Image (spheres, rainbow, N blue to C red):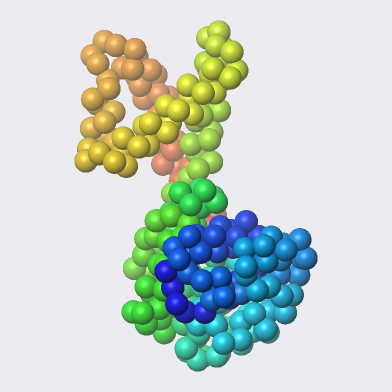
Amino acid sequence: MTDTPSAYRGAGNMARTLIRGVLAAATPPDRLRASDPMPAQRHGLAALGIATTDDNAAAAAGAGIVVLAVKPQRLREVLEALAPPPGQLVISIAAGVPLPALEAWTPPGTAIVRCMPNTPALLRAGITGLYANDAVTAEQRVQAETVLGAAGSTLWVEREGLLDAVTAVSGSGPAYFFYLMEAMIAAGEALGLDAESARRLTLETALGAARMACEGEDEPAVLRANVTSPGGTTERALSILDAADVGAAVRRAVMGAAERAEELAKEFGES
């Protein structure tokens, strides 16, 4: 629960997820406000008892926290118009926009937290990487954790550059698992399973494996070894993956995503 009045600029999927999460944590609706130019988006939040408006300044006035859930291309326009007052915490979930740019578009000394959530946050099962500038107080760090914790877990990084790694591992990460799921479903069908059976076997196996990794004490390497009997089916499958150097390909893919995240940050910073 947060007693600090919060304003959300943008009422899209991620903003709605965060708002529903903080409401579920017993934050009164009258402590939240949201602005969005789209009437349909505002209507969805108004149904939750949230005050909504198309006026960004009106929504942010008097708020202790402003959450920016807008497209990166609009962030400069929004921030320069808001001109956050002293003491107001700005939380940006806009991908790729670096802290120096955010600081250049706000008054000196503005407290800013940059965040990188991932799409499972829409089910409140995500994980968000966070980085704070020097103006953010200990209390404001807790407030940021409360807001982003409404969508899942949170993880602070010690320097901003590590948000590129967060983007590569968890931000883009769901797509890597979906890619593997697609391949496993296709293989199941090729072996004679009907499409629904192949899909169900794949997805529930993925869910169960993730739960074992999250809820148990063993590392993934140990879990893998535990289900790999010498001379068995799993060993045969893994030997084929090893021969194709799949592990190295995954590492190259994640590194490539991190490089692209760094490139995008530079592009936004220069613009």
Q: Is residue 86 above or below residue 241?
A: below
The structure residue drawn at horizontal position 24% and vertical position 16%, both measured from the top left corner, is 229
Residue situated in front as seen by the camera: 175 or 146: 146
Q: Is residue 127 above or below residue 130?
A: above
Q: Is residue 98 above or below residue 228?
A: below
For the question of whether residue 22 can be seen, the reply is: yes
For the question of whether residue 163 can be seen, the reply is: no
Q: Is residue 269 left or right of residue 165?
A: right
Q: Quadrant of residue 192?
A: top right
Residue situated in front as seen by the camera: 90 or 245: 90
Task: Assign the C terminus to one quadrant of the image.
Answer: bottom right
The structure residue drawn at horizontal position 42% and vertical position 33%, both measured from the top left corner, is 207
The structure residue drawn at horizontal position 44% and vertical position 73%, both measured from the top left corner, is 2
Task: Assign the N terminus to one quadrant of the image.
Answer: bottom left
Estimate the x, y position of residue 122 in percent, counting from the top left: 55, 51
The structure residue drawn at horizontal position 45% and vertical position 66%, both measured from the top left corner, is 26
Residue situated in front as seen by the camera: 52 or 85: 52
Q: Is residue 71 above or below residue 108?
A: above
Q: Is residue 253 left or right of residue 45?
A: left
Q: Is residue 164 left or right of residue 192?
A: left
